[in-house]
Image (cartoon, rainbow, N blue to C red):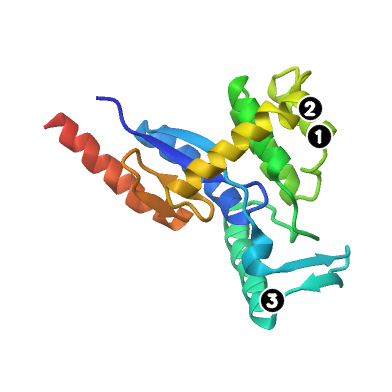
């Protein structure tokens, strides 16, 4: 029997999803498990409020209480600590981005066999403040470098891609997904956060052993 397929939900505006990317690649490579990467667009204002800052970090607009600010500040301290450890650049964002278009780009890249290159470039450049993930032309350019012609990306994003993203989002929430990165086994077993990767690896190893006995 082949190993199970894990579903992994990500959002490009989540630094925690970025930190899970390379460990998830290693999990695929070292265990043989297939991972189906799908977008899940976080509604950050619903639980962390909103804020907009300038290049110097000064708050221009905000709708957060003191608890939410403490949580946001700790989150960035936490992700930068881990990013420094693994050699990634994560710069604090200046606003809450709408990452829906980038998620649609992920679906488009998968259709055209260009997922890995697209995924890597979007994550890396976004967190270096080098990519506007709300700009269709910028994402089409990424898709071209990833190996697609991206000629119909704009029409896909406005029609079929938007509908597919909603369907993916609805299916994720039906499974209980509420954040990213979220790993879901075929039986619906859900693990939220990259810290569960060692547990997932153990489960896969145990299942592989059971197939061989």
Sequence order check: which comes first, mark 1 or mark 2? 1
Q: Is residue 105 above or below residue 51?
A: above
Q: Residue furthest left?
A: 213
Indicate which disc residue 69 carries: 3
Q: Is residue 99 above or below residue 208?
A: below
User: Do the residues bearing badges 1 and 2 touch, measured as CB atoms within 8 Å?
Assistant: yes
What residue is rendered at 81% in x and 44% in y? Answer: 132
Q: Is residue 114 above or below residue 36?
A: above
Q: Left or right of 159: which side holds 183?
A: left
- Quadrant in which the N terminus is drawn: top left
SS label for mark 3: helix
Does any portion of residue 106 appear in the rendered image? no
Place of residue 194 in the rendered image (x, y in percent of width and height, measured from the top left): 47, 53
What residue is rendered at 31% in x and 41% in y? Answer: 187
Q: Nearer the viewer, mark 2 or mark 3?
A: 2
What residue is rendered at 67% in x and 43% in y? Answer: 123
Look at mark 2 in the image and give the residue it sits on.
Answer: 154
Look at mark 1 in the image and give the residue it sits on.
Answer: 136
What residue is rendered at 65% in x and 60% in y? Answer: 44
Q: Left or right of 49: which side holds 211?
A: left
């Amino acid at each position: 029997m082949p190993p199970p397929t894990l579903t992994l939900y990500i959002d490009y505006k989540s630094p925690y999803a970025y930190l899970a990317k390379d460990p998830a690649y290693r999990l695929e490579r070292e265990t043989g498990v297939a991972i189906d990467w799908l977008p899940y667009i976080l509604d950050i204002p619903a639980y962390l409020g909103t804020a907009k800052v300038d290049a110097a970090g000064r708050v221009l607009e905000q709708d957060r209480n003191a608890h939410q600010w403490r949580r946001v500040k700790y989150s960035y301290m936490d992700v930068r600590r881990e990013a420094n450890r693994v050699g990634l650049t994560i710069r604090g964002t200046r606003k809450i981005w709408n990452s829906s278009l980038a998620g649609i780009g992920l679906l488009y890249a998968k259709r055209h066999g260009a997922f890995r290159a697209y995924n890597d470039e979007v994550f890396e450049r976004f967190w270096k403040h080098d990519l506007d993930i709300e700009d269709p032309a910028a994402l089409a350019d990424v898709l071209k470098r990833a190996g697609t012609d991206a000629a119909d990306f704009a029409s896909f994003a406005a029609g079929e891609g938007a509908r597919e993203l909603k369907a993916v989002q609805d299916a994720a929430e039906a499974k209980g997904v509420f954040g990213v990165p979220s790993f879901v086994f075929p039986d619906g077993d859900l693990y939220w956060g990259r810290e569960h990767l060692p547990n997932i690896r153990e489960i896969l190893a145990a299942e592989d052993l059971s197939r061989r006995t």
